[in-house]
Image (cartoon, rainbow, N blue to C red):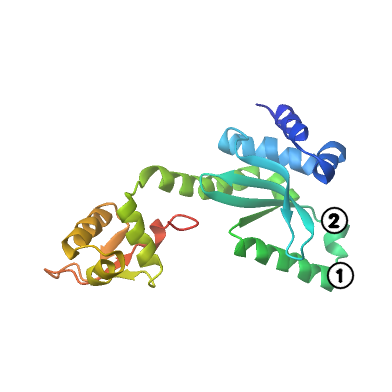
Amino acid sequence: MDYDAWMEYHRKSAKGERLRRLTEQAFHAERTFATKIWQPALGSFEFLYPEYEIRDYRDGIRFLDFAYIGRGLKICIEIDGFGPHWRDISRRDFGAQLMRQNHLVIDGWMVLRFSYDDIAERPRQCQQILQQLIGKWADADKKVKLSPMETALMRLASGSAGMLTPAMASAELGLHRTTVVRHLQSLVEKGLVAPVDPLSKRVARYRVVEEKIPYGGW
């Protein structure tokens, strides 16, 4: 699907203010991003939504330039031009912009911001940012498959400052210690947890390998 067909698809499913925006706005910067940055970097527009409508932290409505929602990710992508809007913005509005971004992060969004100059003059750098972020989590999602018991152990460990003992897991989950240890050893083999004292004959504590935690947790 090319850019024009993709936009037409979203116009047909939009209504209200989102439809007006998709129909009437020029979208020069957004078209440049979609065709020169996004599509060459990721190959398709799957999971990408233009002018994505969300509820504002002040109980109003706002629109993200782009939203990527897929593979367990929620990414807000904003394209910023260095024009009068940013040069003449008031202190109050500047603070409100930052607070909106903070609330997006609290609500589970990752936020990427690109300047129009970077899109136009440094497209490869922008493509690499997208590939690194989305590729990182997509690869993690493909490689790590957990059983229900392993998922329960990872959630328990994540809620216990990243540390877990067989005794704690046995008590919390109502399982025999031997069963817990067997599942913990499977998680060690998958690289998700590691013994705190690997040289000990009887491992007493395990820690979560933080860089393997997927976005949004288990």
Quadrant for the N terminus in the image: top right
Q: Residue at x 31, y 68 (%)?
A: 172
C-alpha separation, residue under disc 2 versus residue under disc 1: 14 Å
Mark found first going from the N terminus, 2 or 1: 2
**Residue 104 horizontal/vertical position (percent):** 65, 61
Q: Is residue 79 above or below residue 152?
A: above
Badge 1 marks a residue whose secondary structure is loop
Quadrant location of residue 57?
A: bottom right
Quadrant for the C terminus in the image: bottom left
Q: Is residue 85 above or below residue 2?
A: below
Badge 2 marks a residue whose secondary structure is loop
**Residue 87 horizontal/vertical position (percent):** 85, 63
Quadrant location of residue 55?
A: bottom right
Q: In front of the other: label 2 or label 1? A: 1
Q: Which label sits on residue 127? A: none
Q: Residue at x 18, y 65 (%)?
A: 177
Near-viewer residue (121 or 201): 201
Which residue has dot 2 on it?
83
Residue type of the residue flagged with mark 2: Gly
Near mark 2 (Cα within 10 A), the count class, few <14, some 14-19 or many ≥20, is few
Q: Residue at x 35, y 66 (%)?
A: 157
**Residue 167 horizontal/vertical position (percent):** 23, 71
Near mark 1 (Cα within 10 A), the count class, few <14, some 14-19 or many ≥20, is few
Q: Residue at the front extreme?
A: 174
Which residue has dot 1 on it?
90
Is the residue under label 1 in contact with that under label 2 (CB below 8 Å)?
Answer: no
Residue 6 located left or right of residue 137:
right
Residue type of the residue flagged with mark 1: Ser
Number of on-image labels: 2
Q: Is residue 22 above or below residue 205?
A: above
**Residue 27 horizontal/vertical position (percent):** 80, 40
